[in-house]
Structures are given as C-alpha cells and as structure tokens.
Amino acid sequence: MTKPNIHPLLADRWSPLAFSSKPIDPDVLASLMEAARWAPSCFNEQPWRYIYATIDDAAAHAQLLSCLVPGNQAWAAAAPFLAISVACTTFAANGKPNSYAWHDVGQATMSIVVEAMHHGIFAHQMGGILPDRVRELYAIPANFNPVAGLALGYYGDRAQLPEALQTREAGPRTRRPADETFFLNRF
C-alpha cells in the first residue's frame, strides 16, 4: 500500500512476468498508442518511436522476441504485444543532439503503461534488449537509438513460468523510501 495514497492506476501498477496470450483488442491498442502520442516532450519534439508486434503474427512476434536478452525471452514469449522503444537523438529543427530524448521516451512509455492499466492490461518494461540486433533487423537510422523493451498483456498463470521466475513473481513489491529519493535544498 502506498503512503500517502496515490491514484489506483499508479498504486496497482506492477511488472508481471506471467502473461496470458489473450490478444489485446485493436481499439484498446489504438488507445495505448494515442496515450503515447500525447505524452509531453522537450520542445514538443516527440522523439519516441515504437517497433511492435502482436501474437497474431507469429513470425513478427518471434522476430521482435529475438531482440530481447534470453532471460526476458523466457517469459515475454507469452505476451500478446511486444515493442521496442526507440529514441530520436537529434532535434528535427537543427540536427543538434537531443539529450532529453530518452527521458521523453520514458514519459511516452509511462503514458502507455497507465493507459494499459486503465484497460486491465499489465506492462513489463525491460532494459534487457539487444540494441545491435534491433538495429540490424529493423534498419534503425544512425540518429535513433533502441531504448527498451515493452511487453503488454493480461495477467496470466504464474504456474506456467519456470520455477525461479514463479518465486520472483510471487515476491513482494518494494520501493526505496521517499526520503532517500527526494532531497529538499540538498543532495
């Protein structure tokens, strides 16, 4: 439980490993994409892009799955929606480096996550991707960088996970105390 209380869409959010393979309705997927589209960004640059695949296209899903590190592949294979976020690292207006791009991609992804929770869909974000493989398979331009993986879906049966992941799935959610994260007038 959070203290003080926060909105249930945030308080109930967690990153499961067990996903049902039940497909996500295309209209719901459209709302998740729209949520990202309206995320804030530096100079309204909107530097985020997402390469995605759904379980309905087994070959495309398997290809995107192959861009995750093996440990993530073990559980993410069941997720009906997989994506890799990509950041444009230069500003469109002048070609100068956009040092805020990864931050902005994170904001867009969090918008997806919160909208997904609104629809009863869980998200698991992953740092464990293979950026070079993403670049190779999807012809990512030089001024774009793969950022992270994203699995979306309805919660599944954790008994389907390997034993070590079942234990991890059942573990408690923990967070660092607020006074170790926020500092008034000092670091």
Image (cartoon, grey):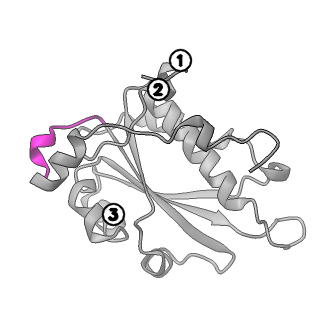
Q: Which residue is painted at 60% across and 51% down in the image? A: 106
Which label number is shown at residue 105?
Answer: none
Q: Quadrant of residue 83?
A: bottom left
Q: Which residue is painted at 48% across and 74% down in the image? A: 138
Residue pointed to by mark 1:
5
The reply to whether dot 3 and dot 1 touch (C-beta < 8 Å) is: no
Q: Which residue is painted at 49% across and 61% down in the image? A: 148
Magenta span contains residue 156: yes
Q: Amino acid at mark 3?
A: Ala
- The numbered mark, 2 or 3, whose residue comes first in the sequence reads 2
Name the mark nearer the viewer: 2 or 1: 1
Left or right: where does residue 50 sit relative to residue 126?
right
Q: Is residue 96 visible?
A: yes
Q: Quadrant of residue 99?
A: bottom right
* Image position of 75 with respect to 131: above or below: above
Residue pointed to by mark 3:
60
The reply to whether dot 2 and dot 1 touch (C-beta < 8 Å) is: yes
Q: Position of residue 160 (x, y in %)?
A: 10, 46
Q: Position of residue 68 (x, y in %)?
A: 35, 67
Per the rendered image, the range of residues in magenta is 154-162
- The numbered mark, 3 or 1, whose residue comes first in the sequence reads 1
Residue pointed to by mark 2:
11
Q: Amino acid at mark 1?
A: Asn
Question: How much space separates mark 2 and mark 3, taking CA atoms?
Answer: 33 Å
* Image position of 55 with respect to 73: above or below: above
Q: Quadrant of residue 19?
A: top left
Q: Residues within 10 Å of mark 1 (few under 14, many from 20)?
A: few
Name the mark nearer the viewer: 2 or 3: 2
Q: Pick whichever, 125 or 25, lies toward us.
A: 125
User: Residue pushed farthest right?
Assistant: 94
